[in-house]
Amino acid sequence: MDEYGQRLYGIVGPYDEGARVTLVCEVDGGNPLPSVTWWKGDVLLDDSYEDTDQGFVRNEMVVDRIERKDW
């Protein structure tokens, strides 16, 4: 979802180089509840997910200055 809470599907963007980008992933369902993590290839970027009161598992990752080489 984007910073306005709108669900996004597939490829997102474009974003300006140097912009701050917040990536949010929410997952509904699963037993046991899933782990929601952000990866770049085989490098773990963020594993700080949380269970929400609404029953979702959520991970939010902030990229302070996105650069073309990052992605």
Image: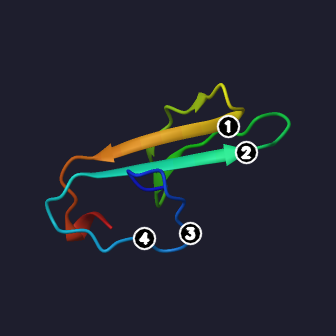
Q: Are marks 2 and 1 in contact (CB under 8 Å)?
A: yes
Along the polypeptide, which appears first: circle 1 or circle 3?
Answer: 3
Residue at 52% in and 65% down = 8
Counting from the top left corner in percent of width and height, residue 69 is at 23, 68
**Position of residue 14 in the picture relative to residue 61 (left or right):** left
Along the polypeptide, which appears first: circle 2 or circle 4?
Answer: 4
Q: Are marks 2 and 4 in contact (CB under 8 Å)?
A: no
Instruction: Please say if 54 is above or below 41.
Output: above
Q: Callout 1: helix, strand or loop? A: strand
Residue at 45% in and 41% down = 60
Q: Residues within 10 Å of mark 3 (few under 14, many from 20)?
A: few
Q: Of all residues shown, which one is farthest toward the left?
A: 18
Residue type at mark 2? Asp
Report how far apart the C-alphas of labels 3 and 2 lie in the structure: 15 Å
Along the polypeptide, which appears first: circle 3 or circle 2?
Answer: 3
Q: Nearer the viewer, residue 26 or 53?
A: 53
Report how far apart the C-alphas of labels 3 and 4 lie in the structure: 7 Å
Q: Which labelled disc corresponds to residue 12?
A: 4
Report how far apart the C-alphas of labels 4 and 1 lie in the structure: 22 Å
Residue at 30% in and 74% down = 14
Q: Nearer the viewer, residue 2 or 32?
A: 2
Along the polypeptide, which appears first: circle 2 or circle 1?
Answer: 2
Q: Which labelled disc corresponds to residue 56?
A: 1
**Position of residue 20 in the picture relative to residue 8 (left or right):** left
Q: Which residue is mark 3?
A: 9
Report how far apart the C-alphas of labels 2 and 1 lie in the structure: 5 Å
Asked where in the image residue 2 lies, by quadrant, the reply is bottom left
Residue type at mark 3? Tyr
Q: Callout 4: helix, strand or loop? A: loop
